[in-house]
Image: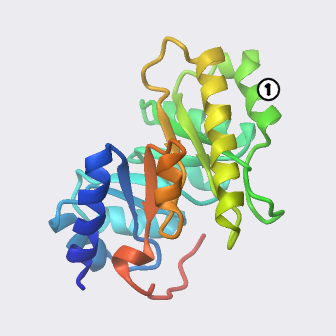
Amino acid sequence: MSIADNLLKYKNELDAVGVKLVAVSKNNPAESALEAYNAGQRVFGENLVQEMVDKQAQLPADIEWHLIGHLQTNKVKYIAPFIKLIESVDSFKLLKEIDKQAAKNQRVIDCLLQICIADEETKYGLEFDEAIEILRSEEFENLKNVRIVGLMGIATNNASEAQTKIEFNELKILFDGIKLSFFRKDDFFKEISMGMSSDYQLAITEGSTMVRIGSSIFGKRTIKHWKA
């Protein structure tokens, strides 16, 4: 099946339940992303800054770019002019740098707090108490150019369905608690980004509002040595 065929299969399924599809185009050429764009996709996810910057320069301006990988503070300035959503905010230091660069570009940048829900030391993310500590802090209140619109989490690789379900459920419970405590009156705090090609259906049942699908749309990735 073509990229367009693969994409439409997911779009039809997800549109029916009101879940946003983030087409993960990382390690695929801009031409592949353009094929998906021509089939109607407007939201794309990348995990490396340089790859995103290169593609953003080549592709249509109305694409909504999501940064889904670990983001170094010294790279924020390169995406601050155009990024739509940074899903992978895993430290207060990073959030403050995003606010700084957003202010320089006279923008407010939407962000998700990445929460560590996986039983893996290699995964990035905030612990539950760290996320709450950030939101409680006076320093966070002074950030005027970032907007926290939800949470993101990545389940343990190759975990059982039961374990994955628990991890997704824990993220949803945290989301509900943070919504009630900090964003009760804010309609913009509404996103839970969890679920990928192998577990997106389970993620949706546990409350995901956006899923990240890559290889199932674009096929086997073309390996390229992009700069981080």
| Residue under pointer 1 | 133
Question: For this rendering, which residue is in front, 151 or 197?
Answer: 197
Q: Quadrant of residue 183?
A: top right
Q: Residue 73: tell me if it is visible.
A: no
Could you tell whether 54 is left or right of 194 in the image? left
Q: Position of residue 197 (x, y in %)?
A: 47, 69
Q: Nearer the viewer, residue 27 or 115?
A: 115
Residue at 79%, 26% in the rendered image: 133
Assign the N terminus to one quadrant of the image: bottom left
Residue at (74% x, 61% y) in the render? 123
- Looking at the image, is 213 positioned above or below residue 100? below
Q: Quadrant of residue 171?
A: top right
At label 1, which amino acid type do we have? Answer: Glu
Q: Position of residue 25 (x, y in %)?
A: 40, 70
* Residue visible at 48% across and 37% down in the picture: 191
Q: Secondary structure at mark 1?
A: helix
Looking at the rendered image, the quarter that the C terminus falls into is bottom right
- Residue 84 % position (x, y): 40, 44
Where residue 112 sits, quadrant-wise, is top right
Q: Residues within 10 Å of mark 1 (few under 14, many from 20)?
A: few
Which residue does the image show at 54% across and 52% down from the upper left?
A: 194
